[in-house]
Amino acid sequence: MLGWLTPPGCLNGVFARVWSAALAGVIVAGVAMSARGDILHLKNGGSIEGAIVERDERSYKVRTLVGTVTVPVEAVVRIEEKPSVLDEYVQRREQVADTPAAQVELATWCEERGLKSAWRVHLKRAIELDSDYEPARKALGFVRVGGIWVEGRGLERPKNPGDEKKADRRDAADKDNDKVVAAIQSQWNVRIRAIKNNKLMSGVERLVRDGRAQIVQIQDPLAILPLVRVLSNGNRACREALVEALSHFPQDEATMNLAVLALIDRDKDICRRALLELKRRNDPRVIPQFRRALFSNNDELIRRAAIGLGAMEATSAVSDLINLLTAQRRKMVEVSTRSYFLDYPITFDTPTVIALGQVSQIRHNPMLGIPSIGAGMVFVDRDYQMRNVIVFRTEVMEALKRITGENFGFDAAAWRRWYEEQ
């Protein structure tokens, strides 16, 4: 019955049985669809892909990759027929090379389309081919401990016994709601990833512009999470499009992700764009979150938070910023050492005798005049040592200047006197 599921080339008897059993589980779970699939295009701009298994005058019941969901008829604009995702998967599986990299690549494709069981099967196959293949190990939650891969679940904190009871008490309507959300977001994930890979990442200006326009036109709030997940790890064009798209959503989810982007994106211009939007929103919850980052004891995060607070002109953060102008850190620093060049004056020790007249003479002992560090010099005599150093946070000072209009440099005492006078 399931012979068509056996991988081509009959990899080996054991793996073939595991493969068939795993994919049989996918079908039994109701994930597999008929040769014909349905895409329900919704009024909010989203879509749900699956197989319509039942319909009445008020709703459709659709079997999707996340389970069977109920969709109101009034929410559907049109229905499009197309081959199911499982049909496409079978075609890809028949062509995939039996190498760890190819198996992980197909597993990633399965994950993006909600084929969780097949995703796991291909990752496990990658490990069968190479037990130390890191991408597959990490994707399955393994961590390396002392050179040995250990299941990460074994290192997690035990769950509260009451958690499962709370989950069981959830209303059935809430669970169905979550399924519908997951189904819609799954389709957004596929659509956004296609725009990212085919246009935003292409490097072709015309395609990048078109991709950015498509991203910005998305209006469904349920697309916010897929937008962030897909575009935040892309190139600069992807992340620029992400900030612009998020700027059009008033929802908390957009504000939250803009705030995090402003703190952690590696591109300063993208951080600036996110900060401009946060300032425009004037959400009273943002500045307290940035102030909390000032106490993270992470110098880079403190600097990023200071830039953000300055951009938002956060007067409430002035006192915190004054206290963070400088910090003492123990760091590995480069120091000059003269252990080698000190021998030179001892070796070249013949004094210079200069006659000032017929009788008077002066003597000058050879001295090394070349500095250890200088313009045009190669600094070859150096060492690295752990030292206590004072870190001067320029970003904090600039934030204070922007917020207050004053400039006391790194003189914390002067800043405090001024602040107390205010």
Image (cartoon, grey):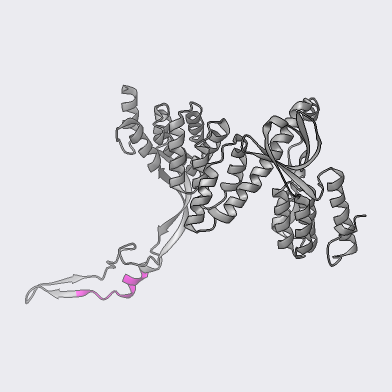
Q: Is residue 84 visible?
A: yes
Query: What is the quadrant of residue 12 in the picture?
Result: bottom right
Residue placed farthest to the left in the image? 358
143 left or right, relative to 255: right
Q: Residue at x 69, y 49 (%)?
A: 112
Expressed as whole percent of the image width and height from the top left, the position of residue 134 reads: 70, 57
Expressed as whole percent of the image width and height from the top left, the position of residue 365 reads: 24, 70
Quadrant showing the C terminus: top left
Magenta segment boundaries in residue numbering: 343-352
Query: What is the quadrant of residue 345 in the picture?
Result: bottom left
84 left or right, relative to 210: right
Q: Nearer the viewer, residue 68 or 339?
A: 68
293 left or right, relative to 103: left
Expressed as whole percent of the image width and height from the top left, the position of residue 305 reads: 46, 37
Q: Is residue 20 above or below residue 223?
A: below
Q: Is residue 1 above or below residue 421?
A: below
Magenta stretch: includes residue 30: no
Numbered label tally: 0
Q: Residue at x 53, y 31 (%)?
A: 250
Quadrant showing the N terminus: bottom right
Q: Nearer the viewer, residue 51 or 193?
A: 51
Q: Is residue 144 visible?
A: no
Q: Residue at x 74, y 62 (%)?
A: 100
377 left or right, relative to 165: left
Q: Nearer the viewer, residue 140 or 296?
A: 140
Expressed as whole percent of the image width and height from the top left, the position of residue 326 reads: 40, 39
